[in-house]
Image (cartoon, rainbow, N blue to C red):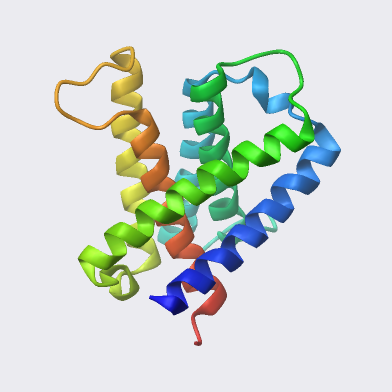
Amino acid sequence: MDKTNKQYDKVIEICRTIFSKKMSDYGTAWRILRPVSVTDQIFIKANRIRQIEETGINKVDEGIRPEFIGIINYSIMGLIQLELKPSEKELAEEKTLELYDKYFNLAKKLMMDKNHDYGEAWRSMRISSYTDLILMKLKRTKQIEDNNGQTLISEGIDANYMDIINYAVFAMIKIEFEEE
């Protein structure tokens, strides 16, 4: 599990660097998005990955790697939006990165706990399975959102975002470290 811990940290570094650079370019314009819009953005990215996986063709000069990074970063934005609520006001860079780190670390802790119990079974899975699991979690999230966040027995939107982060991190680990 030490290997997984180190690989997860490398994925955090990759995603955080891109998030930070985009924040320099755009600020926190995404703060205006309602959580349902964040969910739809994640869906667009996951759907594009599935389309590329099924057809083997991508006409935009980007593969699936940037889409998984986008899924991770949008999921963290979604968690921030659930906590802070949408706003037209910019969020200070330091506070934004503090929240980013908070949620990525919570996702990592969840993954490590589950990874302990499941014995790293995710390493035997295909990237396309992570895509399908992300799409399933998005369908669940949309249903919860359509029910105004109410569930009878299931976990909430935040738990689905956390699982989506971890499935996308697994895909990134497979992409980044496949040969190890």
Going by the image, does 4 lie left or right of 41? left
Total tally of numbered discs in the picture: 0
For residue 141, above or below residue 55: above
For residue 144, above or below residue 22: above
- Residue at x 56% of width, y 30% of height: 80
Q: Assign the N terminus to one quadrant of the image.
A: bottom left
Q: Position of residue 135 (x, y in %)?
A: 36, 43
- Residue at x 45% of width, y 63% of height: 171
Going by the image, does 22 lie left or right of 40? right
Inspect this view and state whether residue 7 appears.
yes
For residue 170, above or below residue 85: below
Residue most toward the bottom?
A: 180
Q: Quadrant of residue 119?
A: bottom left
Q: Quadrant of residue 14?
A: bottom right
For residue 13, above or below residue 6: above
36 or 78, which is in the foreground?
A: 78
Going by the image, does 164 lie left or right of 176? left
Inspect this view and state whether residue 50 appears.
no
68 or 93, which is in the foreground?
A: 93
Q: Position of residue 34 (x, y in %)?
A: 54, 18
Q: Position of residue 177 (x, y in %)?
A: 53, 78
